[in-house]
Amino acid sequence: MREVDVMGVRVEMPSNQPIVLLREVAGDRYLPIWIGAVEATAIAFAQQGVVPPRPLTHDLMKDILTATGNSLEQVRITDVRDGVFFATLVFASGAEVSARPSDSIALALRTGTAIYCDEGVLDEAGLAVPVEEEDEVERFREFLDHVTPEDFEST
C-alpha cells in the first residue's frame, strides 16, 4: 500500500464528469478516479472547510463515529476492475467495511484519516507525471484554488 494525498476535484471535459485526483506521497504517480457530482461536492466542501447548516451524509458518518467512540484508522483503495474502483474503510475496532472510494475519501478528509492505495491499482490506473509536466500540475492546483462546489452541480 502506498499513501496518497487528495489533490482535489475537477470536471473532466467534454464529458462534464467530475474526477478526484490523488497523488502518491512518495512517488510521481497520480490516480484519477471518476466520481459522481454529489461526492465531488462532498470532497470539495471538506477540502475548503465548508460547514453546511445541516450535516451532509459524510458529516453524519463522522459524527456517528465520534459519538460511538470508534475511529477511522485508514482508507484503502484496494482494487480497480473494468474501470470501477473499490475501497475499504479500516476502523480502530478492527472492522473493515467495503465502500466506494469517493465516499471513503470524503469521510477521510473529514476525519483526518490517511488514504492508501494498493500498488497494483497505481500500476494499472496511475499516471506518472514527469518533472517537465509539473507546471501543468501547478495549473491544476490553481484551478483547484478557484473551483467551488457549485461548479459540480448538475444542470
Image: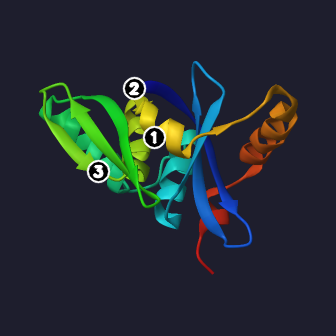
Dot 1 crowding, Cα within 10 Å, few <14, some 14–19, many 20+: some
Q: Earlier in the sequence, mark 3 or mark 2?
A: 2
Say which amino acid is labelled 2: Met
Instruction: Give the CA distance from mark 3 to mark 1.
Output: 16 Å
Q: Which residue is mark 1?
A: 121
Residue 73: quadrant of the picture:
top left
Q: Secondary structure at mark 3?
A: strand
Q: Nearer the viewer, mark 3 or mark 2?
A: 2
What count of labels does the image hold?
Answer: 3
Q: Splitting the image into 4 quarters, where does residue 82 fall?
A: bottom left
Q: Say which mark, if any, is on residue 1.
A: 2
Checking the image for residue 32, the label placed there is none
Circle 3: residue type: Ala
Please say if 30 is above or below 41: above
Q: Quadrant of the N terminus?
A: top left
The answer to whether residue 36 is left or right of residue 7 is: left
Residue 109 visible (yes or no): no
Up/down of 22 relative to 10, above or below? above
Q: Position of residue 139 (x, y in %)?
A: 84, 42
Q: Tell us which disc is closer to us: 3 or 1.
A: 1
